[in-house]
Image (cartoon, rainbow, N blue to C red):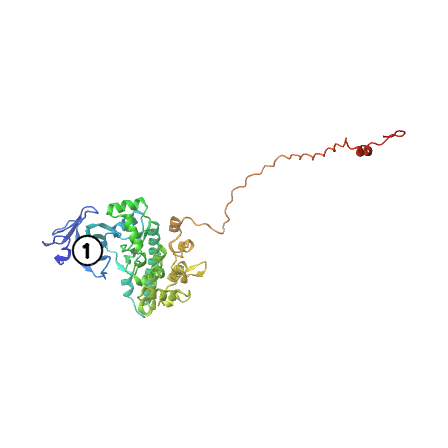
Amino acid sequence: QPPNRFGHFADVSIDYEFLRFSGSVLDSKVEVVGLGNVSDVDVGDRITRHIPLIRRAAFLTKAKYRGMPAVLKYSWTPVDRLPEGAVYKVLESQNVSCLPNIYSSGILVKDVFGYRLEYLLMEDCGETIESRFSKISGPWVLPNLIKSACADISDAITKTTECLVEAASAGVLHRDISAGNITICKGQIRVIDWGYAKLTQPDSPKIQTIANEWGFDLGDVTKNENIHDGMTGTPLFMGIRVLFGHPTRSVIDDIESLFYVAMYALSHLSLGPSASPAFNVHENKAAAYVKLGSIISKKLYLKNFGVKECSGDVKAQLDLLYQLLFYRDNQFIGEELTEGKAEARVVDTTIMRKIIGSDLADQIYGPQVDKDTPAVKAPAKRKTRAAKTKKPAPKKPKPADNSNNQDSIRYRLRPRPGRSIK
């Protein structure tokens, strides 16, 4: 182990075998020790991965913690962006499923030229979807491998969707779902790398408490993460709206990325991703149009993504995702995804129940109302019959006073026989 590996933030002038982390989240320290105790970290080889030149740089190494395989992750992130360790704290506080076990986390360097250095010590999450399916890529895949691969992707669709909707309910969007950020660990699905996540409930007291613990301004960080909505993620798996640079994100965008992850993985069972134009165009808007062309036909979308081998169960799951993402009221809405409007899609809870199950759907979206069952009406109030009242008879008009009218008197008064009126 090269002793200069940690020379920029730990004294490695002596021989060492272990790293010892201590202190609080905002005042974390690391030191090297020759003989470690049970809680020290035995550092192994570095995990090779692409590191961008700007924004966020993360370095991973294999490790052992308490005798178990682990991963040690160091991330240089701008101080006005969200720390990944804080995201895990928010998710853990709401019992979100399919997360890696985090053994320790904290900030080692608070601010150097506008960047902080944080560390995460977590369980080894096994093999990524990218690695798992690239090993079996080719036109001649054995039937037993196809069956096993389809079972893995089926589980990944269900569990990752569960994780994403639970996270969204807790106020977190992942924003970087990719084949490298979904893993299979001893048959269990893990969703990792929440370093590009954003918080959607900044007014939550629980989230504010975590922000204080990690020493960042929740308002500033939320504002900056919102600004980066249209440019965050792995382009190969970004949704159509995101590739067009729309400035808002929702859990539907994360689920759309999962849809492309499934297409990408399953394409390895035939000719591989290189055979599909959807995975070979890298300019954002051009890639968006290619994806739009690939999904335009409900009957041909699998073929358009290079998927030839697919079990019936997985096909049913993909059809549900397809309906959720690209249809509304039985109308294709792909064209709307290219327009510069707010998100045109909403979570269809009927479809979501079929993907994640009724129990979790009830917990997140509320109980389902059966449309076939008539609603129970409240008993009508009893009407009381009002007592009948006779209408007063119309008054007869009084005869006109014609006492001064001589002609009238002559008309009304008839003379008796033998008498005359003068």
Position of residue 194 in the picture relative to residue 42 (left or right): right
For the residue pair 105 and 248, the one nearer the viewer reads as 248
Residue, disc 1:
63
Can you give x and y, in whole percent of width and height, for residue 283 in the image? 31, 66
In the picture provided, is 88 more to the left or to the right than 360?
left
The three-letter code of the residue at mark 1 reads Ala
10 Å neighbourhood of mark 1: few (<14), some, or many (≥20)?
A: many
Q: Residue at x 30, y 45 (%)?
A: 206
Q: Secondary structure at mark 1?
A: strand
Using the rendered image of the protein, determine whether residue 38 is visible from the camera's viewpoint: no
Image coords of residue 229 (percent x, y): 32, 56
Above or below: residue 381 compared with residue 197 = above
Q: Position of residue 132 (x, y in %)?
A: 28, 62
Q: Is residue 344 above or below residue 219?
A: below
Q: Position of residue 235 (x, y in %)?
A: 30, 62
Q: Quadrant of the N terminus?
A: bottom left
Q: Which image quadrant: the C terminus? A: top right
